Amino acid sequence: MGILASIPKIMQLNITVIELAVDASVAFLFSLYVWYYNIYKLPKYTKNQFSRRFFTLRLVYSIIIGIVLMLILVSIHQLLFPRYSFSSMILMYQFRGVLINLTICMFLFFLYQNHNSQLVMVELEKVKSNHLGAQFELLKQQVNPHFLFNSLSTLKSMIELRDPHSNEFILKLSDFYRFTLEKRKQDVIPIQEELKILHSYIYLLRARFEDGLHLVDDTARVAHTGGIPPFTLQLLVENCIKHNVVTLDNPLTIKVYYDENVLVVENRISRKNKPEVSTTLGLENIDKRYLHLIGKNISIEKTSEIFRVKLPLIHEYHNN
């Protein structure tokens, strides 16, 4: 700043290096004062609020004090270097001082406003992230709302019929819910763990439907890495049972297999005579969880005979 302020002097070809250095030192010392004066007027160092307007009393005070300081600096330099006529150029120095003051104040003003804007953006992102996180937690709490009731009803029937498999059913149900509580805290789990949950779930359902329900798992043929939101397959199986006939005479077969980088769950449509009202909660839940995690939708294909859902395998996700 001192060198820039001395450009008019530099343009004079007969100026000496010493005279240039003395002239530049006035602007340098003045700039140093103005810089730190305005720095210590920022909210970090003062309780005063930082106005969004540029022209404020803070700027007026800075200019007034700067004028007095420039007068003092010029007087001191005149005493130290009497051979140079500083006092005769006091108006030029004051003009320089005002320009330096305005330049530094403007720079710090825009710098601080930009800093505040970034802080606001960070806070907005935090609020948005917390909001999405809360929504995601609510989505996870919607998983499996009726399964416990149905399982207990099945267990009650098995005990009344003195079914010898009732003890094993209790153990499997206990293990399943322990596994549920452990994995519910996670956003994404490995696909192999999700398949284990599915097989445990199918075991419990077969105690209710017996040979009316079949699972064809073809995932072992192809080794795949990646993850999936927990209990996604359970929701899809619940959706199949809700909308299709599941009887010994008309068994429901659910197939799970890979198609390139997606996991496919499909079943042959066998509509009930009195279909339940569809709330689309299960599919909507899965779709929203995928949108939250990777920004993609699941694919749903439906024909007159086949209902198919394609789930992208998750390798990386936003919250990882």
Image (cartoon, grey):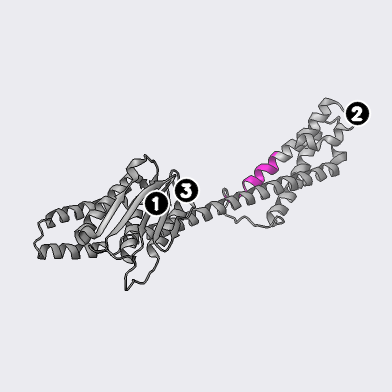
Residue at x-position 37% and y-position 62%: 282
Who comes first in sequence, dot 3 or dot 1?
A: 1
Q: Is residue 252 left or right of residue 83?
A: left
Q: Amino acid at mark 3?
A: His
Residue 14 shows in the view = yes
Quadrant where the N terminus sits is: top right
**Looking at the picture, how far across and down is residue 249, in whole percent?**
24, 64
Residue 37 among magenta residues = yes
**Looking at the picture, how far across and down is residue 218, in whole percent?**
33, 46
Q: Which residue is mark 1?
A: 264
Q: Which residue is mark 3?
A: 318
Q: Nearer the viewer, residue 303 or 257?
A: 303
Residue at x-position 74% and y-position 50%: 63
Circle 3 sits in a helix, a strand or a loop, which is it? loop
- Within 10 Å of disc 1 (Cα), the crowding (few <14, some 14-19, many 20+) is many
Q: Is residue 46 left or right of residue 206?
A: right
**Given this view, does label 3 or label 1 mark the residue nearer the observer?**
1
Q: Nearer the viewer, residue 143 or 262?
A: 262
Q: Residue furthest top?
A: 17
